[in-house]
Image (cartoon, grey):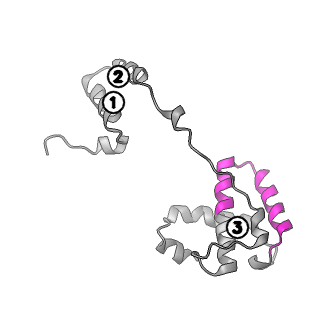
């Protein structure tokens, strides 16, 4: 499965949570295909009382759900889900972009608080272009 995930574009850093999720599943000797709805509900209960954030729990649930679907279907492309796996529910987080966008007044206040021209130019370029900090910092003048 992990070779298929790498071939499908998943990075090694996204494979680590897969492994963590699979380890926490702890089948008690049962093959993954034989895990019952009750087993999966108990596993989810344990995850929620493990001190992890909701985001981490949802990520682990998504990975384990994908892994169990693979165990049943033997393919990442087959999206059919066995009924026992349906009890693994993940919340869909929707980013609140309105909350994260600075108003024109906020940007003016930040730029006016800059101590030098270089910082003002960087912030203005960030705001006007919509580029990320890494993109702006990698720019070279006069090349």
For this rendering, which residue is in front, 6 or 95?
95
**Is 77 positioned to the left or the right of 101 in the image?**
right
The residue tagged with tag 3: helix, strand or loop?
Answer: helix
Residue 143 is marked as none
Give coordinates of residue 127: x percent, y percent: 35, 32
**Is 70 positioned to the left or the right of 11 in the image?**
right
Name the residue at the bottom extreme: 74
CA distance for labels 1 and 2: 7 Å
Magenta stretch containing residue 40, yes or no? yes
Give coordinates of residue 51: x percent, y percent: 74, 48
Q: Main secondary structure of the magenta part?
A: helix
The residue tagged with tag 1: helix, strand or loop?
Answer: helix
Name the residue at the front extreme: 80
Residue on which the image places disc 3: 23
Magenta residue span: 35-62
Contact (CB < 8 A) between labels 1 and 2? yes
Residue on which the image places disc 1: 123
Magenta stretch containing residue 109, yes or no? no
Badge 1 or badge 2: first in the primary sequence: 2
CA distance for labels 3 and 1: 45 Å
Tell me what residue is drawn at x 81 percent, y 56 percent: 45
Query: For residue 78, what is the image quadrant?
Result: bottom right
Give coordinates of residue 143: x percent, y percent: 14, 46
- When the figure is inspected, residue 39 is found, relative to residue 125, above or below; the finding is below
């Amino acid at each position: 499965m992990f070779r298929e995930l790498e071939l499908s574009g998943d990075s090694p850093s996204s494979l680590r949570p897969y492994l963590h999720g699979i380890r926490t599943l702890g089948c008690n000797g049962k093959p993954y295909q034989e895990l019952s709805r009750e087993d999966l509900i108990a596993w989810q209960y344990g995850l929620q009382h493990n001190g992890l954030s909701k985001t981490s729990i949802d990520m682990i649930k998504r990975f384990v759900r994908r892994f169990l679907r693979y165990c049943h279907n033997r393919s990442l492309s087959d999206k059919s889900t066995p009924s026992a796996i349906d009890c693994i529910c993940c919340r869909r987080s929707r980013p609140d972009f309105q909350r994260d966008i600075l108003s024109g007044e906020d940007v003016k206040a930040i730029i006016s608080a800059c101590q030098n021209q270089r910082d003002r130019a960087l912030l203005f370029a960030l705001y006007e272009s919509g580029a990320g900090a890494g993109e702006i910092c990698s720019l070279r003048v006069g090349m």
